[in-house]
């Protein structure tokens, strides 16, 4: 019997937000109305081979927020 397995337990919490909810959270954090906020998700290729032998994976690398 493993004493580590008996004394520890794995804990994970996952939160999932829609794009509109994310926009509202950002607006709330900035202290502005959500209709004044535009949120763009910047997708870039990451993990590509430097010699261009294989393509990387497209991932959201930045969130661009514009307040009008």
Image: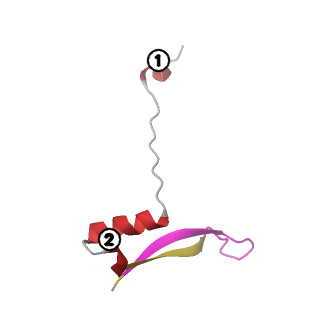
Residue, disc 2: 27
Quadrant containing the N terminus is top right
Residue at image position (27%, 71%) is: 30
Q: Residues within 10 Å of mark 1 (few under 14, many from 20)?
A: few
Residue lying farthest to the left in this orientation: 31
Q: Is residue 11 above or below residue 44?
A: above
Quadrant containing the C terminus is bottom left
Q: Residues within 10 Å of mark 2 (few under 14, many from 20)?
A: many
User: Is 62 inside the magenta-drawn segment?
Assistant: yes
Secondary element at tag 2? helix
Left or right: 45 as drawn, with respect to 11:
right
Q: Position of residue 45 (x, y in %)?
A: 61, 73
* In this rendering, the label closer to the viewer, 1 or 2: 2
User: Is 52 inside the magenta-drawn segment?
Assistant: yes
Q: Nearer the viewer, residue 49 or 58?
A: 58
Q: Is residue 41 above or below residue 66?
A: above
Residue at image position (45%, 67%) is: 20
Which residues are drawn in magenta?
A: 46-66
Residue lying farthest to the right in this orientation: 53
Q: Position of residue 49 (x, y in %)?
A: 67, 71
Res. 3 mark: 1
Q: Position of residue 4 (x, y in %)?
A: 46, 22
């Amino acid at each position: 019997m493993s004493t580590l397995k008996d004394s520890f337990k794995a804990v994970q919490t996952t939160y999932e937000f829609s794009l509109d909810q994310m926009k509202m959270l950002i607006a709330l954090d900035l202290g502005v109305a959500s209709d004044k906020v535009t949120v763009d998700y910047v997708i870039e290729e990451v993990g590509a081979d430097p010699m261009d032998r294989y393509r990387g994976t497209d991932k959201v690398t930045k969130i661009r927020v514009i307040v009008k």
